[in-house]
Amino acid sequence: MGFWTAVGKFFTKIGEAWAAADTLQKINYVLTAVTLAVGVKGFLQARNMLNKGQDILANKTSMGGKIPVIYGTRRVGAQIIYMDVNDNDCRDMYVVYALSVGECDEILGRTIELDGNPLTDSARFRNGGYIGSDKIASGSGSLNTVSQNGTNSLNLAGGTFGTDPTAKYRYVMNLHHGAASQTADPMLVASMPNWTSSHRLDGICYIAAHYGYDKEGMWRGVPQLTVQVRGKKVFDPRDNTQTFGTVSTYKHSDNPALCFLDYITNNEYGKGLTQSQINMTTFSSAANVCDTLVDQPYFNGSAKSVTWEGTSGNDYINITGTGANSIWWQNKIGEKIDLEDGSGNLVLDGAEIKDVQRTEFYNAQAQYSVYVNNILGSNYSSQGGTSLLKVKRFHCNGYLDANKNVMDNAKELLANMRGIFLYIDGKYELSIEDTGSSTFSITDDHIISDSGISVDYGNKDKKANKVIVEFFNANKKYELDTATVLHDASPNYTSDDGGEVLEVKAEFPYF
C-alpha cells in the first residue's frame, strides 16, 4: 500500500467515526484534539526554555554577538573575547571571559566552576590557584600582578586558594567588575606583550584567567567557565544618594521595577528614554510593591531550627547536622535570612542570600553552603540555632540577551512582575497589576433601571484552575524546573462533572 493511499484511508476512517459518533462523543473528540495541540505547544515551550537555559551557561566565542546584561543574581557562562599563549608556548594559556555589560556588584570567585567542576574540588584540581578582585586594592585577594609565564608555580594543596598576588600559580582568576573606567588587567599586561595598559575593557564585567601546563592533564582544551554574579548596578529613584545618569552612584538590586527602568533608559542596549520622559513616581511605587516582604511557605512566619557553622571573614555558612539537605533546600537566592546562633544571638539580620551550593566530592561528605551579602565577624562551630526567611513579592534574577530586540526583552521583564507599561500625558508610567481594594460600594440607590445591574465575570476559557510555571532552579544548578499551582478556592472553574482541567503554562526566565 502506498504512503498517500494509507493517509487517505486513515482520514476516511476518521470521517466515518465522526459521522457515527453521538454529540457527547464528538465533544470528547474535540477535547482530545485540543489537549494534543496544547501538549505539543507546551512541549515546544519547554524545549525553547531548556535551550535558553543551556545557552546562558554555555561559553561562546565572540564573533560580533552582543555581550549580555545580568540583572539580580545569576550563574552565567561567558563570551571568550581573547585567548592566546605566551610566545607560541602552549604551556601558558590566557583567556578573557566576558560576563556582562555594565558594572556588576560582585563576581563570586569561590563559585567559579570549570567544565562543571567547582574550584574547591581537590580531586579535580590537584593544585590550588589564586582568585583576585579589582574591588580589593592590595594584599591578599587583590588582582594578581606578575607574569605567570614559565614554571615554579606555588605547589598548593588541591582545591585551595593562595594569598600572595605576586606569586605564580597553576591557575589565576582576576575578577574585573566592569566600571565605566577601569584599569587593564595587570597579570595580562605583565605576561602578554600584545596586552597593554590601553586594553581596559571599560564597562565590561570580565574574568582574566591563566592556566599553567599540568603534565597530568588537569586542563582539557579551553576550560568552560560558569560563575555566580551579582549583576548590574541600577538607579533607584527612592534613594536620595543616587543621581540619575551618574552611574558611580548606582547600586545593585534585584527589584524588577528598577531593572526595567535601567533597561528602558539605557542608550547602549535598551530604549534610551530620558528622565524627562518618565514618571519616576510610578516607578518608585512599583518598586515598593516589588520589595514587599512576604512569608516563605516553609517558614510561614516562624523560625525553624538549623545546625550551622561558619568562619570569620567568610560570606557563607555551612548547614550541617541531621536533615541538612532538607533545611538547605529552603534557602533561595534573593530571600532575606535572619540567623541566630546556639545562644539566641542574632548573627544575620535580613541578609540577602546571593547563592546556594550543594557539593559532594568523591570520597567526601556532602556540603551545603548558603552565601549571603554579609561577612561573618566570628567563628561559629556546630551552632544549634534558628533561621527565618522571607521573600520579596517580586524579584528579577536573570540574563538579558542583548541580541534580542527591545520589545521582546521589555515584555519578559514586565511579565516577571505583572507590570503594565503605560504612556500617559506625555510620560511613561509603570504599574504593577494588583488586587487593590474597593473604592466605591454599590447600593440599591444606584439602580436606575428596572432590569437592574448586569455583571460580567468573564469567560471561563480565560480562567485557570491549574498553572504550571517553568523557571531555572538555582538550587539545581539552574536546570529547567517546573512548579504546579492548583486553584483550591471558589469558584473552581471546572466543567459540570468537575473533570475539565483549565491549564495555563507560564515561563519565568527571570524568576
Image: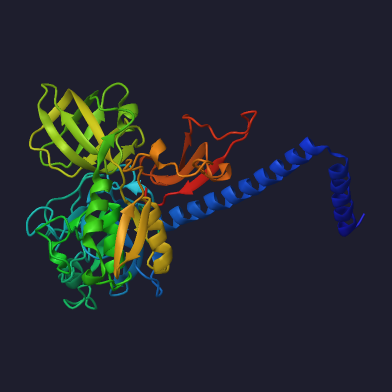
Q: Is residue 407 above or below residue 499?
A: below
Q: Is residue 489 left or right of residue 93?
A: right
Residue 6 picture location, percent across and down: 88, 53
Q: Is residue 171 visible?
A: no
Q: Is residue 200 above or below residue 502?
A: below
Q: Is residue 502 above or below residue 270?
A: above
Residue at 88% across, 55% down: 8
Say which of 252 and 94 sits in front. 252
Residue at 34% across, 27% down: 326
Residue 361 picture location, percent across and down: 34, 37
Residue at 10% across, 37% down: 312
**Number of labelled discs?**
0
Say which of 267 and 58 sits in front. 267
Q: Is residue 290 left or right of residue 29?
A: left
Say which of 510 and 137 sits in front. 510
Task: Classify residue 311 by image quadrant.
Answer: top left
Q: Which quadrant of the rendered structure holds the N terminus?
A: bottom right
Task: Classify residue 135 by image quadrant.
Answer: bottom left
Residue 154 picture location, percent across and down: 18, 53
Residue at 35% across, 62% down: 422
Q: Residue furthest right?
A: 1
Residue 394 picture location, percent across and down: 31, 46
Say which of 125 and 240 sits in front. 240
Q: Give the colour scheme shown.
A: rainbow
Task: Classify residue 203 by image quadrant.
Answer: bottom left
Q: Is residue 505 visible?
A: yes
